[in-house]
Image: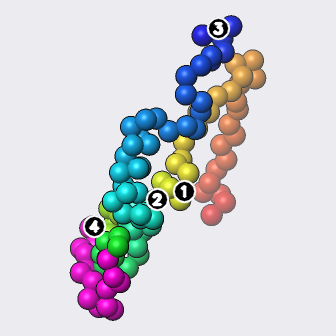
Amino acid sequence: MAQGKKTGGRPPGVKNKRTREMAAIIEAAAPGWDPIAWLAMIAQTGCIPPAPGQPPATPGAAPEVEPELRVQCAKIVAPYLYPQKKAVEHSSDPDKPMTFHVTNLDAAI
């Protein structure tokens, strides 16, 4: 590092070579297929959607999945939809200590 700054290397947000290669392989095998949407469909409907490039299944003909698999699919998709909760560290200024006032809760009832 020069002068405490990053100089060179892959810019932030650019996928590495292996990730780009895997994306190209998946796109070549199944053009336009979105694995997150596919998992979300399983979690929502409880049925396995047709594979990419396959004709849509007739209503009621798609194989149903166990509830456990639907939950697993939802767990996989959730981080793409909702931010992950982070731990919060509580601290105080040592020169200004926190004070707590405890009241009689029995009297309030």
Q: Are marks 2 and 1 in contact (CB under 8 Å)?
A: yes
Q: CA distance from mark 4 to mark 2?
A: 14 Å
- Say what amino acid the circle numbered 2 marks: Ala
Tag in front: 1 or 3: 3
Q: Is residue 52 visible?
A: yes
Residue, far top: 3
Label 3, residues with CA under 10 Å away: few <14, some 14-19, many ≥20: few
Sooner in the amino-acid sequence: mark 2 or mark 3: 3
- Looking at marks 1 and 3 on the same chain, the residue that comes earlier in the sequence is marked by 3
- Residue 28: mark: none
Residue 87 shows in this picture: no
Q: Residue furthest front?
A: 28
Tell me the quadrant of the picture where the C terminus can be found: bottom right
Left/right of residue 58 with respect to residue 84 in the rendered view: left
Which quarter of the picture shows residue 87? Answer: top right
On the image, the x and y values in percent for residue 1 come to 60, 10
Which amino acid type is marked by label 1? Answer: Tyr
Secondary structure under the numbered disc 2 in the rendered image:
helix
